[in-house]
Image: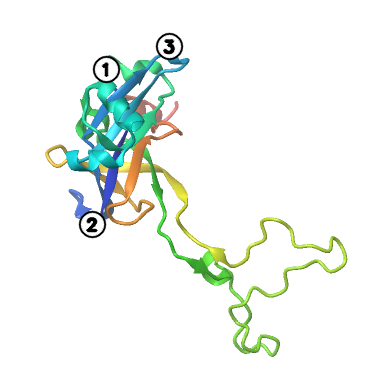
Amino acid sequence: MATGLLGRKVGMTHIFTADGDSIPVTVLQMGPCTVIRRKTAEKDGYDAVVLGFVEVEEKKEKRLTKAEVGVFKKAGTAVFRHLKEVRPRDAKLLGELKTGDVLKVDQVFKLDQRVDVTGVSKGRGFAGVFKRWGMKGAARDSSTAHEHHRHPGAIGQRKTPGKVWKGKHLPGHYGVDNITTQNLVVAGIEAEGNLLLVKGAVPGHADGLVFVDTASKGQPRVKKKQEVRERAKPKV
């Protein structure tokens, strides 16, 4: 089984636990995704699967090149708008997946699992140093900050080295970056609507494309009750 799925961000809401606590969650519609290609170590040098998401209408297929459509004809599947190659750390996780298989959210993820969510952040256009880098600026009552409260200030180093270093925090284009938020917890799964509820915020705007994968930092170790009891016993 693949370790991740393609989907889209629906929005944010909150759910209540059995104790009555409110938890903010992001609702993601994950899949269903279709396996377009299965790569193997013998043929391709590594094990992976290529997933397709969002079918393209037949009347819009003419917008694609013959080479792009040929990939799906060879696989014997419908034409999809988004493709993603999933390459797990262990080839055994792919199991017996083959071309044409359909993966749903409840087949890949489970409750309390930790996941990494990748998306494209919101575009904010050309932004100043306050919004882009969180700079504080000069005090409002400063005599040297006349009409320059939100300006970056001096950026040079005089004679030595006599230049502005690369990477200097300056105004510029902000947003539209590929961002991965790690170690988010799966708070709920709705199999009928292919919905995945994830604790916390996810990068990107509503209806934006996201990729959810098993956390690269591993899953938390679940301690058995008996083990916890043994450790809690006082040593004589």
Percent from the top left, x then y, of residue 232? 38, 32
Residue at the image position 31 percent from the left and 48 percent from the top: 199
User: Which residue in the structure is indicated by mark 1?
Assistant: 98
Percent from the top left, x then y, of residue 181? 42, 46
Task: Indicate which disc, 2 or 1, sits on the residue closer to the N terminus.
Answer: 2
Return the residue nearer the eye: 171 or 17: 171
Which structural element holds mark 1?
Answer: loop
Marks 3, 2: nearer the viewer: 3
Disc on res. 185: none
- Which corner quadrant of the image does residue 124 belong to? bottom left
Q: Of all residues shown, which one is farthest toward the left?
A: 192
Name the side, left or right, on which 16 lies relative to 236: left
Marks 2, 1: nearer the viewer: 1
Q: Is residue 100 above or below residue 184?
A: above
Name the side, left or right, on which 24 lies relative to 171: left
Residue type pointed to by label 1: Lys
Residue at the image position 43 percent from the left and 9 percent from the top: 42
Percent from the top left, x then y, of residue 209? 32, 46
User: Which residue in the structure is indicated by mark 2?
Assistant: 13
In 3D space, how far apart are the residues under numbered discs 2 and 1 (Cα atoms)? 36 Å
In 3D space, how far apart are the residues under numbered discs 1 and 3 (Cα atoms)? 15 Å
User: Which residue in the structure is indicated by mark 3?
Assistant: 43
Which structural element holds mark 3?
Answer: helix
Is residue 222 visible in the rendered image? The answer is: no
Residue type pointed to by label 3: Lys
Which structural element holds mark 2?
Answer: strand
Give the crowd class for mark 1: few <14, some 14-19, many >=20 residues within 10 Å: some
Q: Does the residue at mark 3 contact the one at mark 2 (Cβ under 8 Å)?
A: no
Task: Indicate which disc, 3 or 2, sits on the residue closer to the N terminus.
Answer: 2
Percent from the top left, x then y, of residue 114? 35, 37
> Count the marks: how many?
3
